[in-house]
Amino acid sequence: MLDQRSSNIITVKAHTNIALIKYWGKRNESLFLPMNSSLSLTLDQFYTMTTVQFCKGLNEDVFIFNKAIAGEAETKKVSKFLNRIRKMAGSELHAIVKSINKVPTAAGFASSASGYAALAAAAAKAIGLDVNQTVLSQIARQGSGSASRSIFGGFVEWKKGLKDDGSDCYSLQIAGEQYWDIRILSVLLTTEEKLVSSREGMKRTVETSPFYQEWVLEAEKDLQEAKTAIKERNFERLGRVAEANALKMHATTLGANPPFLYWQPGTLAVVNQVQRLRNTGIPAYFTIDAGPNVKVLCLPENEQVIKEKLLSVPGVRDILVCHPGPGVTYTSDSI
Ligand code: 2P0
């Protein structure tokens, strides 16, 4: 019925998330099914805002990114993702998609998480799919794995599931953004593009690293420990397991063939400073994604002193302070 006319214009805002227990490796690449479950905190600072309208009479999808017509490759990715949504809705309408990204590449956060979460939520609603957030997390996942978690605010678990069709692989909220006021300091070291993308890096690791099987087992144990720590609001317990989990993820890349490492000298300098802070009794823990930048977990009362100490580390360019943030929200703001 929708195909007789154009759809409503729907705008959605979605935030990035930082994994405290990492997603690293797929068991099915086309469906984006992960080898291990993961756990993240959605952040308030960085987001993508996306508007979608399916239009009668349009011959192909149009993608406008940060106010400019996007290149062919980017538009193709969006179209491929929209094809899944069109198929679910039984529609052949093409769409105008406008996206604004408030995720500085320099911050070392993947914008694919907020990007596909916003696109999934806006496109599903615009095309008239009546889906809950669980299903939305499954749709977003098929654009980028970590996008599955950005559907929800606060602490989020992405369950790996066991089924081949991915029907039991989805994200859910463990605790809302008001539950626990912890901080993530995003330490900016470099804006250089990394040599191995996370998609390629996880694939190479799954296929070649002798440490990979152990990673999968450890990640499941770490996840349980993190969930207990969140339940207890035990900061040290959460920080310890998040830091250890990140190190285990990076250890798998050293065993890959060819081996690779996302760290740069500044990465290690920040890691050392965090450890020094802990030795002086200040609770701070680090995590590192598939890149050189470091994120530091801390409590509000220690934010200032930790920020100062980290800013004095050679190579640190800036520090952005993040709080727990919300899940996808529909808005009438225009972009
Ligand atoms: C995470 N990362 O859990 C992990 C930790 C990077 C390191 O999710 O291939 O952009 O699109 O599913 O989600 C980055 O990988 O990869 C990521 P795809 P994605 O946040």
Image: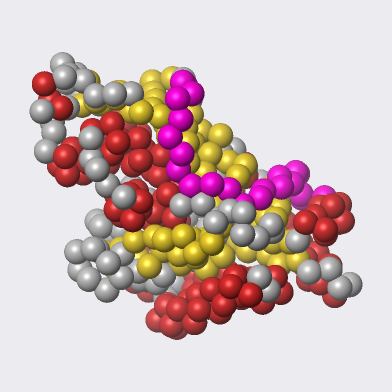
Q: Let me know if residue 314 appears in the view.
A: no
Q: Is residue 311 magenta?
A: yes
> Is residue 254 toward the left or the right of residue 134 in the image?
right
Q: Above or below — where is 197 with respect to 54?
A: below
Q: Position of residue 281 (x, y in %)?
A: 86, 73
Per the rendered image, the range of residues in magenta is: 310-335
Q: Which residue corresponds to the image point at 60% horizontal and 70% vertical from the top-left?
A: 230
Q: Position of residue 326 (x, y in %)?
A: 54, 47
Q: Which residue corresponds to the image point at 24% horizontal and 56% vertical from the top-left?
A: 30
Q: Above or below — where is 75 with respect to 141?
A: above
Q: Which residue corresponds to the image point at 19% horizontal and 64% vertical from the top-left?
A: 165
Q: Count how many numbered circles sit on residues in the image.
A: 0
Q: Let me know if residue 133 appears in the view.
A: yes
Which color mode does the image show?
secondary structure
Q: Position of residue 322 (x, y in %)?
A: 67, 48
Q: Above or below — where is 118 with respect to 224?
A: above
Q: Nearer the viewer, residue 124 or 219?
A: 124
Q: Position of residue 209 (x, y in %)?
A: 42, 76
Q: Which residue corresponds to the image point at 29% horizontal and 53% vertical from the top-left?
A: 135
> Is residue 331 toward the left or the right of residue 299 in the image?
left
**Quadrant assignment, res 92:** top left
> Is residue 234 toward the left or the right of residue 6 in the image?
right
Chief SS of the magenta region: loop
Q: Residue furthest top?
A: 57
> Is residue 311 toward the left or the right of residue 332 in the image?
right
**Quadrant assignment, res 118:** top left
Q: Is residue 325 magenta?
A: yes
Q: Which quarter of the rendering shows the N terminus?
A: top left
